[in-house]
Image: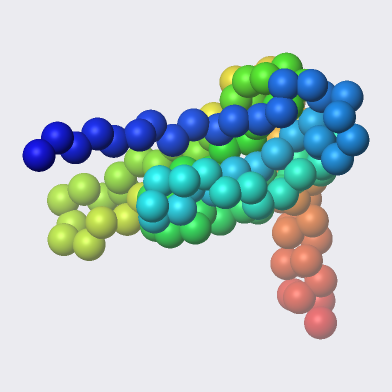
Amino acid sequence: MNHTHAVQTISATRNPDVPGVARFQIYQQTREGIYAAAFKTDSAVEAVGAFLRQSPAFEGGEVRLWDNREQHLSAWVKWTPENPGVGVSQYGRENVFQDRVLAIIARHGESREEIREAVRQGVRVLV
């Protein structure tokens, strides 16, 4: 019996001028290995923010940010094992940006979030 496994790829419309096709699209990998669309926008800032907040569909599942205009993968999540000696497997999330501009947007967004959290902590202490 001959089994063939189809490789699942992210396919996007090749013409970015088609109405309804957003520039950026976030995809989540399902347990079946299919990449399902999770979010779309034309804004790079919104796309990066949504990508940073997007959780996988299952533990260790892939999350990808696709650029329809440039027709390339702009960012993805890399899962690395944490505490490999411990019996329970836990993975740490690393956001990998292929697009330098999107990486800069992500760093600025993370910095703003750290400042917001510090302010929230200060307010809680004062209350």
Residue 56 locus on image (x, y percent) = 51, 54
45 or 16: nearer the eye? 16
Q: Which residue is depicted at the point 90% across and 35% down?
A: 19
Q: Which residue is depicted at the point 28% across and 36% down?
A: 5
Name the quadrant of the N terminus.
top left
53 or 110: nearer the eye? 53
Instruction: State left or right for residue 22 relative to residue 56.
Output: right
Name the quadrant of the C terminus.
bottom right
Examine the rendered structure and indicate whether residue 92 appears above or below residue 4: below
Q: Which residue is depicted at the point 78% across and 66% down?
A: 120
16 or 92: nearer the eye? 16
97 or 120: nearer the eye? 97
Q: Is residue 52 visible?
A: no
Residue 37 locus on image (x, y percent) = 64, 47
Q: Is residue 31 visible?
A: yes
What is the count of numbered marks? 0
Instruction: State left or right for residue 99 relative to residue 124.
Output: left
Among the 4 quarters of the image, the one containing residue 121: bottom right
Q: Which residue is depicted at the point 26% across and 50% down?
A: 83
Residue 14 locus on image (x, y percent) = 72, 21
Q: Residue furthest front?
A: 1
Q: Residue furthest bottom?
A: 127
Examine the rendered structure and indicate whether residue 65 appears above or below residue 56: above
Examine the rendered structure and indicate whether residue 57 appears above or below residue 34: below
Residue 124 locus on image (x, y percent) = 76, 75
Colouring method of the image: rainbow
Instruction: State left or right for residue 35 relative to residue 51.
Output: left
